[in-house]
Amino acid sequence: MRILVATDAWHPQVNGVVRTLTKLADAAEGLGVAFTFLTPQSFRTFAMPSYRDVRLAMPRPARIAKLIEEARPDSIHIATEGPIGLMVRRYCRQRKLPFTTSFHTRFPEYVRARVPVPGSLIWRALRRFHAPSRAVMAATPALARELAERGFDNVVLWPRGVDTHLFHPRAIDLCLPAPVFLSVGRVAVEKNLEAFLDLDLPGTKVIVGDGPARASLEEAYPDAIFLGEKHGEALAEIYAAADVFVFPSKTDTFGLVLLEALASGLPVAAFPVKGPRDVIGNAPVGALDHDLRNACFAALDISRQDCVAFAANYTWEASARAFVASIEGLGAVLPCRNGAEQPRFVA
């Protein structure tokens, strides 16, 4: 089975969407499923306003059609609502081809953090984008319920995973005053990092990641340690060396970094909002409190082994199986290109 995924988020971007799609494709190989990605790398791009590190594609309809037809996919999945996602949606609609989509980002909250646009208008646009989709994939049951309540149809669950071979406890010393409170992710306004950096905490605050707000935050908070982007073993070692993972975001739909931290034996401190609440729930692996400082201190007393055991329930193989099952269960077919009777599925 060949699945084409259209995404506006791709390397060298470092975010949850890119990591999710990359890990999904790796895990799906064991299921006999091959992924092809239609990404900004195939087009001219321009810097996104207010976030110059993100490049937006300028796809042409003819180029989109050529790339899809060369890939000869059995199914089409649109992962993002950007220029590429819009063009692939248009391609499918014009040819009456079914497709699936996924909901990764709370754009209403992200946009409102930058410009005063009514959230109702953005939700309306998102509903319109996803309306023709045979299945709108959501990462958690709570997000799936919210989307259904907001008028999205055909919402299905697509859980996430974590690479426990990479992220696991190990003896690492960052040689920083303890306890070490760590936050990992894009350094941007929607991540609400000031709520963490403003806290009166002992030890050291460490920020891993890059983004448009990094320079201003480094200047405003000289006592915090900003390490920039880290990947692979370097990132895994930082997780394992910290004492508490602080997640101040109130806009994330899931937060893969939560699972990476827990797999590393790192308890979570966060606000009791969608994202951390959906991932952690009532499990004794995190402290969720409207007072983030209280959450940070409470997390210090949480068992690291409990965190590791909790994260072991999330695998990329299970995530890939759920993704493929949602596609196969639709039963939508394309006319065979080679004259054979074997149906070709399109999702």
Image (tube, helix red, strand yellow):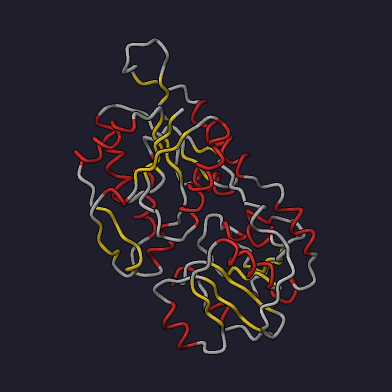
Relative to 21, 203 lies left or right: right
Q: Position of residue 48 (x, y in %)?
A: 30, 64
Relative to 138, 55 lies left or right: left
Vertical placement of residue 12 versus 245, above or below? above
Image quadrant containing the C terminus:
top left
Front residue (pair 262, 174): 174
At horizontal 66% and vertical 78% (from top left) the residue drawn is 174
Vertical placement of residue 191 versus 34, above or below? below
Relative to 37, 236 lies left or right: right
Relative to 243, 221 lies left or right: left
At horizontal 59% and vertical 41% (from top left) the residue drawn is 319
Note whether residue 229 is visible: yes
Front residue (pair 286, 174): 174
Front residue (pair 86, 46): 46
Instruction: Name the image quarter holding residue 96.
Output: top left
Q: Position of residue 314 (x, y in %)?
A: 66, 47
Instruction: Name the image quarter holding residue 118.
Output: bottom left
Vertical placement of residue 29 versus 245, above or below? above
Note whether residue 92 is visible: no
Instruction: Name the image quarter holding residue 36.
Output: top left
At horizontal 73% and vertical 63% (from top left) the residue drawn is 169
At horizontal 36% and vertical 35% (from top left) the residue drawn is 132
Q: Position of residue 22 (x, y in %)?
A: 49, 48
Q: Position of residue 46 (x, y in %)?
A: 25, 61
